[in-house]
Amino acid sequence: MNRIKQKLQEDSPSAGRAGKILSIYFSAGYPNLDDTVKIIQDLEKSGVDLIEIGLPFSDPLADGPTIQESSTAALKNGMNTALLFEQLKDIRKTVSIPLILMGYFNPVLQYGVEAFCAKCEEIGIDGLILPDLPLDVYQEEYEPIFKKHGLINIFLITPQTSDERIKAIDDASEGFIYMVSSASTTGAKQGFGAEQLDYFDRIANMKLSNPQIVGFGISNAETFEQATKKAKGAIIGSAFIKHLTANGVAGIGDFVKQIR
Amino acid sequence: MKSYHADERGYYGEFGGAFIPEMLYPNCEELRQNYLNIMEEPSFKDEFHQLLKDYVGRPTPLYFAKRLSEKYNTKIYLKREDLCHTGAHKVNNTIGQILMAKKLGKNRIIAETGAGQHGVATATVCALMGIQCVVYMGEIDIARQAPNVARMKMLGAEVRPATSGSKTLKDATNEAIRDWINNPVDTHYIIGSVVGPHPYPDMVARFQSVISEEIKNQLQEKEGRKNPDFVVACVGGGSNAAGAYYHYLDTPEVGIIAVEAAGKGIDSGESAATSALGKIGIIHGSKTLLMQTQDGQITEPYSISAGLDYPGVGPMHAHLFASGRGEFISITDDDAMKAGLELCKLEGIIPAIESSHALAIFEDRKFNPDDVVVVNLSGRGDKDLQNYIDYFKL
């Protein structure tokens, strides 16, 4: 069984607060080119439930300054798709938690979608998040390729997504739905207002068949708790990258501990 | 019959579509569902055409360039978009989109700009309508295009520097898109070219199509025929070209010539000739030809003309290239500058450096003496004076 599905079906994930999933995002190749494996291993040891490995892109449209900068720095360090696969080739010898690759569609298209998915399967990647690969194109052109290689494609919803479209996305989803907390790029907002909390309630009341994991705007224990009151889990990206910028790969465990 | 227009989903052949993150889906969907209906409303059409006439100064002349024609032994007509208010064809689109934004109930406008021409055209129509305007411009472009930055400020727009990536047009576009993600309800994004996610390429092409509509009528009057043998335009993103080709796309007897910026030469590493150097990929929400690394990272183009240094082309043009419907020619900085100066001397018209690229084809591309060749003179050269001064040591 796909590790993402398995993780989300477990009643009590590895650590902490009653069954809530903590997912961490980082840009591969940042702060140093060869930090990728060490970061993944330390995150697993620290009790994180899911890891999103960011494939850096020159033009990350949906990202705020923090992830833009880590992405640019990673590219400058020499990161590319083939190198990331090379770094990850033995990752399943030491790490067992679900791993997701997150990036923009163009580098995947250039690598070749089929070749990319085959490589993911070979390494033991469980899912992909490609925000600019739209639902209709995925379903018409790529779904069979993803399925053939055991990859779950994670879709996003936002506060502006219509109920009708949320249902369509729920139907097309496996694993979980990536619930963008507010109308923003990554790392933009601090804390949640009434509007976000209403949105969290609204989605919870829709009784979707897939669990939701909230991303964008979660940076500390307080926002993690708010985001996961109704949802299954939450994702931290920019705040973790800021931690890496300040501390390098030291103290990853301390960062995770202060979240939960 | 095969059509070179966009299909219902915004595809030109295999190019186009809407490769956008979910955050942009409602905005683009709202526009997609409404743009054709709004453009068909009589009140919209009336206001659009009235403004094009009284405010922009349309129709722009179709001018028979006698001395230029003699020199190259063919019949060259210039479509004088350089005479539009604000100095280029860009304003045709911004007039259309500001009216569209009003119909959609938006009260805030954002735009990207490279050299500043589209920014000025957007700031202009926002002033005209009394709507708040924010223009994103690369930090590097702000430094080298000070007069246009000043124009935008005089017109009441806020110019925000794009400080990410290479700090030029593509990054300004990224920043505008990020702004739209952060302001999805009240804001309309006025894209300046036939690029971006569906329905932008088609919508912008329709607003610019007034150019070829006028050419047809004017040519009928002057030559007794609606169709030229060739229509020539420069292509960066490709909005002036899309407008000049529009009514001829599905008329195979009209040759379509697209002129790209070769910069310092196609193989120099400093070029913007996307058809020669690009591969299919995704930029700013559109699947099109794109200059990129083998790894799929978008590369920075170069041209002496700020309006042509975009790493992609609109999907319409990618399809014209891939299908063979369009003839693509690339012109170096040097040849463009020479052709620009030649137009000054022969016809008393100082062209924008973008348009000079289109004029430069006559040196090598020969036409028959009775061929009617329409060149879209997309903009005037005032904005480029400093470049001309530096280049020719005037």
Image: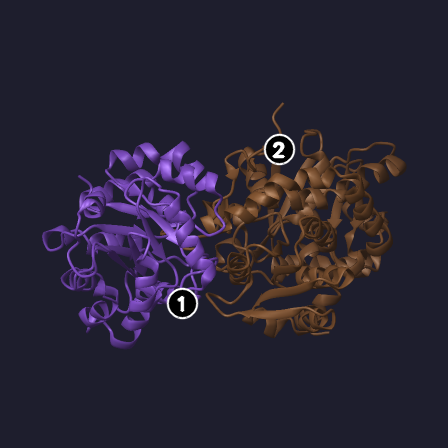
Chain colours: A purple, B brown
> Does residue B328 appear in this view?
no
Disc number for residue A191: 1
Which three-letter amino acid code belongs to the residue tagged 2? Tyr
Whole-angstrom CA distance, mark 2 to mark 1, is 49 Å
Quarter occupied by the C terminus of chain A: bottom left
Q: Is residue A225 left or right of residue B85?
A: left
User: Chain letter of disc 1?
Assistant: A
Instruction: Name the residue beneath numbered marker 2.
Output: B4
- Return the x and y of residue B15 as percentages of the image width and height: 52, 39
Whether residue A81 sits left or right of residue B270 in the image: it is: left
Q: Chain of mark 2?
A: B
Q: Amino acid at mark 1?
A: Gly
Query: Is the residue under label 1 in contact with that under label 2 (CB below 8 Å)?
Result: no
Q: Is residue B324 visible?
A: yes
Residue A27 vs B365, above or below: the answer is: below
Nearer-the-camera pick, A77 or A205? A205
Residue at x-position 40% and y-position 55%: B297
Residue A107: x %, y % from top left? 37, 49
- Please tell me in which quadrant of the rendered image residue A222 appears: bottom left
| Residue nearer the viewer, B218 or B120 | B120
